[in-house]
Image (cartoon, rainbow, N blue to C red):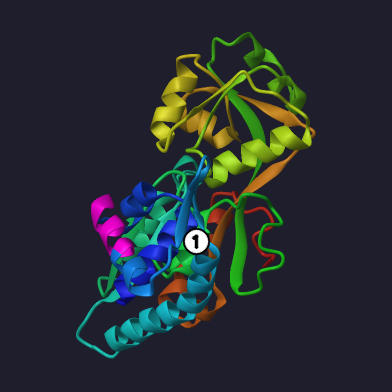
């Protein structure tokens, strides 16, 4: 058994798909499949079973993941500690960026922060629909600037540091020529029978949409799914369907935004594991973003830590 095999199993379990896991790990699907097959042969048991909704862990798979998670966490921490001991190496910082960073014009301010810190080598992860919290847990990213699936999503997960930076009212985004674009407000119930554009199946965005429809007993006519925000908004502009999102998306992508009632909010948040706040560059980036949001009058509730 290798740490790579264990990591592959954990990632497939999180994604419920080998192809999706391969994309997130930047390896081929065949490499993941072959390694998991070798591991199953070594353990003499099946770790996954295929269902209509994707790959599911068997009982043996559940037990394996429970035992393997602390091993992989310890291995990744060891690698990080060894890298930190190399004083000649640059500091590495991996940041997951949600679309609200761009629609609120914060990306250039983030780049300026790193322009002044050449000792930090930064990489940005911007894959639409990516489960950034899972990536944080698996230490694939160090911090995330994105919204949460729901505002109270982390209430019972004390290991996360969670700071709201920009609060935005949710709207229904549509083509400017759509007759509803002239309305002052629009009800969530008006999604009944609508065509909605969302993230890939089982992404955080897709789960949020399905929960919203379940809670309000709404049946959609059709859902188009894509992992690219530019593709989604292009479909909105062409009148294919509507998207749920903030007014900043409407300005950024040149579409119409009608506020939803009952009123709901989603926040662009600074999220990381509390254990990583000891890193100076993470604290400084947080303070930089809070200052920028105040200067641009974007900060609303940003002084409150969740």
Residue 274: image quadrant is: bottom right
Q: Nearer the viewer, residue 290 or 149?
A: 149
Q: Secondary structure at mark 1?
A: helix
Q: Is residue 126 visible from the viewing direction of this image?
A: no
Above-or-below relation of 228 to 92: above
What span is in magenta? 29-37
Above-or-below relation of 144 to 228: below
Could you tell me which residue is drawn at 67 percent across and 53 percent down? 300
Could you tell me which residue is drawn at 40 percent across and 29 percent down? 231
Pinpoint residue 18: horizontal percent, then vertical percent.
37, 51
Q: Is residue 98 visible from the viewing direction of this image?
A: yes
Sort mark 1 into few (<14), some (14-19) or many (20+) by Cα contacts within 10 Å: some
Q: Which residue is mark 1?
A: 134
Q: Nearer the viewer, residue 53 or 283?
A: 53
Above-or-below relation of 255 to 297: above
Could you tell me which residue is drawn at 32 percent across and 73 percent down? 42
Q: Determine whether, in the image, residue 78 is placed left or right of residue 251.
A: left
Q: Nearer the viewer, residue 88 or 189?
A: 189
Which residue is at the far left? 88
Quick one: quadrant of the N terminus? Answer: bottom left
Q: Main secondary structure of the magenta part?
A: helix
Pinpoint residue 257: horizontal percent, then vertical percent.
61, 25
Quick one: quadrant of the C terminus? Answer: bottom right
Q: Determine whether, in the image, residue 218 is placed left or right of residue 95.
A: right
Q: Determine whether, in the image, residue 53 is placed left or right of residue 40.
A: right
Pinpoint residue 81: horizontal percent, then vertical percent.
34, 87
Residue 161: image quadrant is: bottom right
Q: Determine whether, in the image, residue 92 is placed left or right of residue 288.
A: left
Pinpoint residue 249: horizontal percent, then vertical percent.
52, 34
> In the rendered structure, does residue 96 fall within the stretch colored magenta?
no
Could you tell me which residue is drawn at 42 percent across and 84 percent down? 74
Above-or-below relation of 135 to 17: below
């Amino acid at each position: 058994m290798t740490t790579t095999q264990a990591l592959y199993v954990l990632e497939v379990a999180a994604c419920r798909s080998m192809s999706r896991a391969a994309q997130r790990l930047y390896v081929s699907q065949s490499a993941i499949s072959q390694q998991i097959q070798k591991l199953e042969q070594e353990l003499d048991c099946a770790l996954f079973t295929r269902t209509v909704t994707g790959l599911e862990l068997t009982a043996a798979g559940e037990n394996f993941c429970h035992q393997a998670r602390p091993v992989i966490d310890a291995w990744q921490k060891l690698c990080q500690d060894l890298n930190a001991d190399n004083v000649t190496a640059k500091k590495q910082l991996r940041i997951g960026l949600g679309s609200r960073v761009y629609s609120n014009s914060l990306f250039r301010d983030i780049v300026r922060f790193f322009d002044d810190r050449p000792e930090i080598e930064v990489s940005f992860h911007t894959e639409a629909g990516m489960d950034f919290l899972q990536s944080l847990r698996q230490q694939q990213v160090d911090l995330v600037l994105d919204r949460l699936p729901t505002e109270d999503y982390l209430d019972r997960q004390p290991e996360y540091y969670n700071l709201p930076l920009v609060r935005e009212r949710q709207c229904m985004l549509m083509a400017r020529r759509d007759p509803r674009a002239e309305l002052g407000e629009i009800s969530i119930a008006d999604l009944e029978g609508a065509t909605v554009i969302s993230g890939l199946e089982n992404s955080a965005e897709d789960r949020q949409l399905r929960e919203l429809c379940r809670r309000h007993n709404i049946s959609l006519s059709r859902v188009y799914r894509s992992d690219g925000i530019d593709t989604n908004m292009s479909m909105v502009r062409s009148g294919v369907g509507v998207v749920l999102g903030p007014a900043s998306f409407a300005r950024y992508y040149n579409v119409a935004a009608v506020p939803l009632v009952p009123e709901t909010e989603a926040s662009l948040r600074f999220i990381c594991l509390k254990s990583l706040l000891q890193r100076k560059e993470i604290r400084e980036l947080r303070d930089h973003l809070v200052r920028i949001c105040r200067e641009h009058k974007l900060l609303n509730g940003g002084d409150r830590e969740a």
